[in-house]
Amino acid sequence: MMPKTVTLIRHGESESNRAQKLAEEGLAHENEAALMSVHTSERRLTPRGIEQAQATGAFIRAWMHRWSISVGECRFYVSPYARTMETAGHMDIVNARWRLENRIVERNWGSMDQLTYAERIRVYGELKLRKEHAFFWRPSDGETMQDVFNRYRDLVGTMHRDCPEMHVVIVAHGELMWAARTLHEHWSPHELRREMLRRDDHTRLVNCRVVQYSRRACDGLDPRWTPRIQSVRFVDPVAPEDSERNLDWRPVTQQTFSSGELLARAEQYPRFGDS
């Protein structure tokens, strides 16, 4: 059985995130070459990232209070990267004992990770395929999203065995959270592509985005815990009341298909020959 809730949190703004934003604006981070020479696991939060982490901690503490959840009822996992450990630390969950978990590290971007963002675009023009081919695209000598999905699925097996009556809080990375959404929301590879291409501020995996799953319907009508995940919500802890950046609880369902519906879905894709 899954934990009662699974709360996924992306780390706060990192120095790499800041360098990327500057590159997208046509500017350069003054120390980008030195920053990119350090392995991604050692890159730190910016001051803004620290503030985001503190706001996230306030949200998590308030949620635990509202739901009458004690720290002893929770399992806390964090990726062993500097920016995720900093995020978890600045969340300041009193008496929480965090477990460093290698299965939720950032997607391996291979040799691309050591390049500046301008160099990435120049050398790896196929970076645009990250969303177009979503589940299957491999960045250079790094990981596909399918690889990340399999890592996270293995952790879910551990949660099934060890945490069925607990609440799990995970601080990790954006790509890991895409993989987690694919698993928990029963997406096909093409549905992952659709969601990655769709820029929806309600659900976009911004820094310190909280994606929270529950085994309760969370509609206020039935307080019982069911065996499976029933609902999901999306919170931006920096602005939790902003209706443009948050999405309240909604149901999670697994779609099934008849033979005809499967054929109709297949017909969406072109043939390249008559035989």
Image: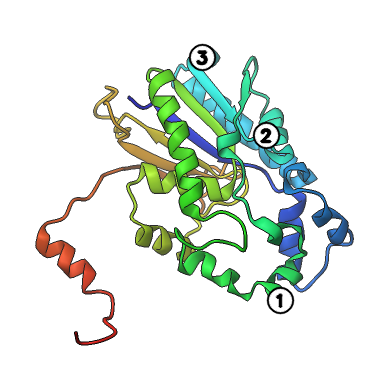
Residue 165: image x %, image y %? Answer: 38, 17
The reply to whether callout 3 and callout 2 are in contact (CB within 8 Å) is no
Residue at horizontal 71%, vertical 57%?
113
Disc 3 designates what residue? 70
Q: How packed is label 3: few (under 14 Cα within 10 Å), some, or many (20 or more)? A: few
Q: Amino acid at mark 1?
A: Arg
Q: Which label's residue is closer to the chain start, 3 or 1?
A: 3
Report if residue 195 is visible in the image.
yes
Disc 2 designates what residue? 80
The total of numbered circles placed on residues is 3
Q: CA distance from mark 2 to mark 1?
A: 31 Å
Residue at horizontal 71%, vertical 55%?
17
Q: Nearer the viewer, mark 3 or mark 2?
A: 2
Q: Secondary structure at mark 3?
A: loop
Q: Amino acid at mark 2?
A: Pro
Q: How packed is label 1: few (under 14 Cα within 10 Å), some, or many (20 or more)? A: few
Residue at horizontal 33%, vertical 29%?
215
Report if residue 246 is visible in the image.
no
Query: Can you tell which quarter of the image residue 1 is in?
Result: top left
Q: Secondary structure at mark 2?
A: loop
Q: Amino acid at mark 3?
A: Ser
Residue 22: image x %, image y %? Answer: 76, 65
Disc 1 designates what residue? 122
